[in-house]
Amino acid sequence: DPGFTASAGVPPAWTVAGKEMEEHLAKLRLRAISRTRTYFLDIMKELRRPKTHIRMIQTHALLKYGYLVDFLLVASPTIHGEIRDVYVESMSKTLHTLFRTYHKQLLTLDLRLATRVDLIAVEEAALRDAFSTKVNMRKRGDAFVLGDRAKVLDGAISAESGLDAAAAVVLIPPINAHVASMNGEKYPYEMIFRSIMSHLIDAATNEYVFARQFFKEYGQNDCFHAIFGKTLSLVLEQLENYLFNCHDAIAILLMIKLTHSYKRTVKARRIDKVLEPFLDRVTNLLWPRLKMVMDAHLRSIRSANAKKCGGGDIHPHLISRRYAEFTCSILLILNRGRKAGSNMDAGNDKLPSDKIMPRSSSHGSSATSAPSHRGSAGDMLMNDLDVMLEEMNLLLKRLADEHSSNKKRVVFMINNLDQIITIFKERRVAGKELNRFSEILVHQRELFVEEELLQTFSKMIAFVQQTEAHMSGISVPRGARGVAAPADVVNPEVVESLVREFASNWKSGIEQINRNVLSYFSNFRNGMEILKQVLTQLLLYYTRFQDVIRKVWRGKPPSFCKDLVSTSVILAEIKK
């Protein structure tokens, strides 16, 4: 050290002994540089070997001798730069190869659930096998049912529920490709995506921390981007290639939710500066593809008709089941991760506010509503669901119009609406869709009640309606007793025939109604509700019929009144 002064006031380097040692010290320094360079280059070669435990080498063979890197930075900046460049190149190639191989292995495990023909309103021919006219049940709805697929979000839910966001993603371990392949296991693509992204974020975290500790680089030009640039581009390219032929809206929405959870993870690990732009690019790939798949489903519903999809049966159609399962799956994914204590309500589902917003329900909601940010991708998805709801209602009407009688049209509508509502309730999804279909179902049930009663008791119902309308237009003089002479209001012979006809046929009529309802409606609970409405309406009509007779013959009831059936008798029969 030239600044160091010996006891005699002369720096050691200026002394005779010091000058003699300078050459030896220089040789010693060069030898130290050479051996340090050789050591690090040998270690770098090990990083490029297959099946190498990189983290162990970094910890025990590199970070342990980090002071030598500091020595090279002072003694030989050129050699220091060479070591840095070799490490960057070695790790860049190693990581690129690892993720390329891992993705290739995982693709062999891909359980592709949806193809381009897996639409809500699919043509019936697409559901048949090549050599059969029967519908293949295996093709009926796997791409529309959420089932256990939402478990892929368990890490994200834990983060939102208050656990450490940095550790949330590892609650479910990534796929071990070798073990899964040996066991013959298959996974939907969102599980493959989660495995790749989990490994990627862990590797990025490790490299980000290691590079700063080893090379002491803390500025904008640190070596992280040089190490991970090719790998990040590879992952984006692989995702883009897969999405090009991906028609699974559930998988895409699950990947969007996962990406939002990974954003919280990288922020918790304080590596968001280097990985958040990459995650934004992932999101920008997923949303447009989801929009394309949603548009394809909408077009299928809009263009569907009875000729393509088959609509000759009055029982629930496959399209209504697919629509209900698909909509419930989307809304359940959006609700996934909400804090405990809030009810499942599709009217207020949300993802993080930067991409998807809470949804308001015009019919009220059990959860607190949040402000909506117009123009977001989430609003786009909600608008698509609203349009799909109305298009589905129009499609059911088009399919119902193919039936010959008005009664069959109503029965078809009731069966399909009931199937949709039943699926919503089974999945515990409430909100705008459920309320809308419930309103339509109430109206269709009222129409069926009238149609069914007109088939058996049409004469009595027509008499009651016409007579009540006629009597409401008759003015009664003040102080007069009775309404008018019976012959001025009704034909006594007609009334007598109606009384005797009802007395003789009402039991068989109720039995026929019961048989019709049981044959029309596949859902027993729905059928019992409708039967109750029909019989209640029948009792109301008959009560009104008796009221008309009492009003017309107030003074002296005619002899045929003894044949009137008591409402208590009818009630007793209904209870049976």
Image (cartoon, rainbow, N blue to C red):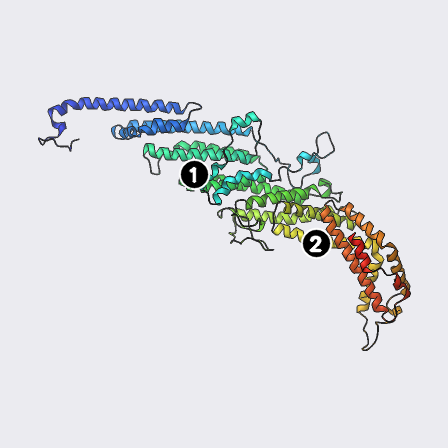
Image height of 96 relative to 333, above or below: above
Q: Position of residue 186 (x, y in %)?
A: 58, 30
Q: Nearer the viewer, mark 1 or mark 2?
A: 2
Q: Position of residue 282 (x, y in %)?
A: 49, 39
Q: Position of residue 302 (x, y in %)?
A: 66, 45
Few, some or many residues within 10 Å of mark 2 (<14, 14–19, 20+): few
Residue 321 sits in quarter:
top right
Question: Tag 1's secondary structure?
Answer: helix
Of 98 and 531, the residue lying toward us: 531
Amino acid type, mark 2: Val
Image height of 420 relative to 481, above or below: above
Question: Tag 2's secondary structure?
Answer: helix
User: Can you identify the residue that label 2 sits on?
Assistant: 442
Residue 149 sits in quarter:
top right
Residue at 82%, 67% in the rendered image:
470
Residue at 77%, 57% in the rendered image:
537
User: Can you identify the residue that label 1 sits on?
Assistant: 275
Few, some or many residues within 10 Å of mark 1 (<14, 14–19, 20+): many
Q: Position of residue 187 (x, y in %)?
A: 57, 32
565 with respect to 90 (left or right):
right
Amino acid type, mark 1: Leu
Residue at far bottom of view: 479
565 with respect to 270 (left or right):
right
Q: In whole angstroms, how far apart are the C-alphas of marks 1 and 2?
A: 52 Å
Of 500 and 32, the residue lying toward us: 500
Of 167 and 65, the residue lying toward us: 167
How many numbered dots are placed on residues in this image?
A: 2
Indicate the quadrant containing the N terminus: top left, top right, bottom left or bottom right.
Answer: top left
340 with respect to 444 (left or right):
left
Q: Report if residue 283 is visible in the image.
A: no
Q: Earlier in the sequence, mark 1 or mark 2?
A: 1
Residue 58 sits in quarter:
top left
